[in-house]
């Protein structure tokens, strides 16, 4: 079956009578200005900001996985082929449904979640085996990169059931690139950038070593 397309219809609803904002499959949501969010994270400290970001991302990843599980089909036909395929219930392994999907479809849904949260526009770049998530127009700016990094990582962990790491690769004006890979691969690439390599050169050199990138 084809991967589901991201559909934002009804993803955010406003209950003005009760003063509530609702997200799809989530408790009521509170809208806050990005300056206040940055101030709160700065006051809480680096570790607390990461914990918060991963929690935000986990909620995004959970909604993403539920959508993929709800649209995946399994072959439930009897031996005589008389019964048509049926959709899997929400209780199936949603992470497995996400892992069966194309990476482009997963990024499309993750990008939709990120956009609905007001965190910017997400796209994907492939550098050989290396996967890079690109966020444009993020209102938090450079000060919010640690939070954005944690959100992306929390979302990927929640929706795939695996433990990919996400690390900031490069920032230029309103665009930030985040490398998805193992801890060792991220540390290696970031170290090469710190000593003067361009981020593109660091990714190319990653393939010349023994450490693989990718999720």
Image: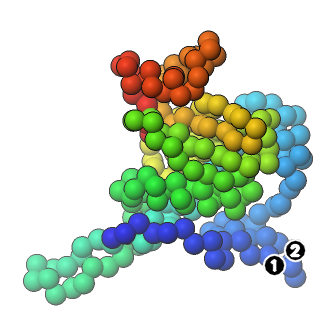
**Label 1 crowd bin: few (<14), some (14–19), many (20+), radius 10 Å:** few
Percent from the top left, x then y, of residue 135?
A: 65, 46
Q: Are marks 1 and 2 in contact (CB under 8 Å)?
A: yes
Residue placed at 85% from the left, 34% from the top?
42
Tell whether 10 sits left or right of 32.
left
Residue placed at 57% from the left, 26% from the top?
199
Q: Secondary structure at mark 2?
A: loop
Residue placed at 48% from the left, 33% from the top?
181
Residue placed at 62% from the left, 37% from the top?
177
**Label 2 crowd bin: few (<14), some (14–19), many (20+), radius 10 Å:** few
Q: Is residue 97 placed above or below 50 in the rendered structure?
A: below
Q: CA distance from mark 1 to mark 2?
A: 6 Å
- Judging by the rendered image, the residue that carries numbered circle 2 is 19
Q: Is residue 58 placed above or below 73 in the rendered structure?
A: above
Q: Is residue 170 placed above or below 63 in the rendered structure?
A: above
In the rendered image, the quadrant that contains the C terminus is: top left
In the rendered image, the quadrant that contains the N terminus is: bottom left
Tell whether 31 sits left or right of 52.
right
Q: Which of the labelled discs sits on residue 15, or is there none? A: 1
Residue 38 in sight in this render: yes
């Amino acid at each position: 079956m084809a991967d589901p397309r991201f559909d934002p219809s009804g993803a955010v609803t406003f209950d003005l009578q009760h003063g509530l904002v609702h997200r799809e499959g989530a408790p009521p949501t509170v809208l806050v200005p990005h300056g206040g969010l940055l101030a709160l994270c700065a006051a809480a400290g680096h570790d607390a900001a990461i914990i918060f970001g991963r929690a935000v991302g986990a909620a995004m990843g959970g909604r993403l996985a539920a959508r993929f599980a709800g649209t995946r089909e399994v072959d439930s036909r009897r031996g005589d082929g008389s019964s048509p395929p049926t959709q899997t219930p929400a209780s199936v392994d949603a992470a497995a449904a996400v892992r069966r999907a194309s990476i482009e479809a997963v990024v499309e849904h993750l990008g939709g979640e990120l956009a609905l949260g007001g965190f910017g526009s997400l796209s994907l770049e492939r550098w050989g085996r290396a996967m890079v998530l690109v966020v444009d127009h993020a209102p938090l700016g450079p000060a919010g990169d640690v939070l954005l990094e944690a959100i992306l990582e929390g979302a990927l962990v929640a929706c795939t059931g695996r433990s990919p790491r996400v690390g900031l690769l490069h920032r230029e004006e309103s665009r930030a690139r985040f490398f998805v890979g193992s801890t060792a691969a991220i540390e290696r690439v970031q170290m090469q950038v710190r000593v003067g390599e361009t981020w593109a050169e660091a990714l190319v050199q990653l393939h010349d070593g023994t450490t693989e990138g990718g999720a």
